[in-house]
Image: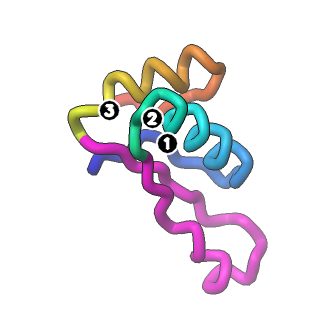
Amino acid sequence: MQELLRTNDPTIIAFATALLDGEGITAFAIDVHMSALEGSIGILPRRLMVAAEDLARARLVLADNGIEVKAK
């Protein structure tokens, strides 16, 4: 799995996941339950992961929809 996106905004994670699902790309959100450790103040970013072979296509899907993706 490769990191595609990192954000503090849970709505972006949900939107990106829906876009990727619509393209047949499986995405997995991690760090979503870290709010229990941070006290629900939203300082720890959530990450969206995809399979390595889907990374380039996933970046294109998100960029086409105005979501800034992690560059490497």
Measure how far apart labels 1 and 2 are at the Cα level. Answer: 5 Å
Q: Are marks 1 and 2 in contact (CB under 8 Å)?
A: yes
Along the line of sight, the residue nearer the viewer: 5 or 14 = 14
Magenta segment: 27-51
Q: Is 34 situated above or below 64? A: below
Mark in front: 3 vs 2: 3
Provide the secondary structure element on which disc 2 rests.
loop
Q: Residue at 61% of width from left, 27% of height from top?
A: 67
**Residue located beneath label 2 in the image:** 70
Give the answer, above or below, for where 29 lies relative to 50: below
Going 42% across and 40% down the picture, which residue do you hit? 4
Within 10 angstroms of label 1, few (less than 14), some, or many (20 or more) residues? many
Q: Nearer the viewer, residue 58 or 67?
A: 58
Residue 59 in the image: state x and y as whole percent.
43, 25
User: Which mark is first along the chain, 2 or 1?
Assistant: 1
As measured in the structure, the alpha-carbon distance from the residue carrying label 1 to the one carrying label 3 is 10 Å
Give the residue number, with chain letter if any, for mark 1.
5
Q: Position of residue 1 (x, y in %)?
A: 27, 50
Please report the residue visible at 59 percent of the width from the left and 75 percent of the height from the top.
33
Does 33 appear in magenta? yes
Q: Earlier in the sequence, mark 1 or mark 3?
A: 1
- x, y (%) of residue 26? 40, 44
Amino acid on which disc 1 is placed: Leu
Q: Where is residue 62, by image quadrant?
A: top right
Q: Could you tell whether 17 is left or right of 27 in the image?
A: right
Relative image position of residue 23 (x, y in whole percent): 47, 27
Q: Nearer the viewer, mark 1 or mark 3?
A: 3
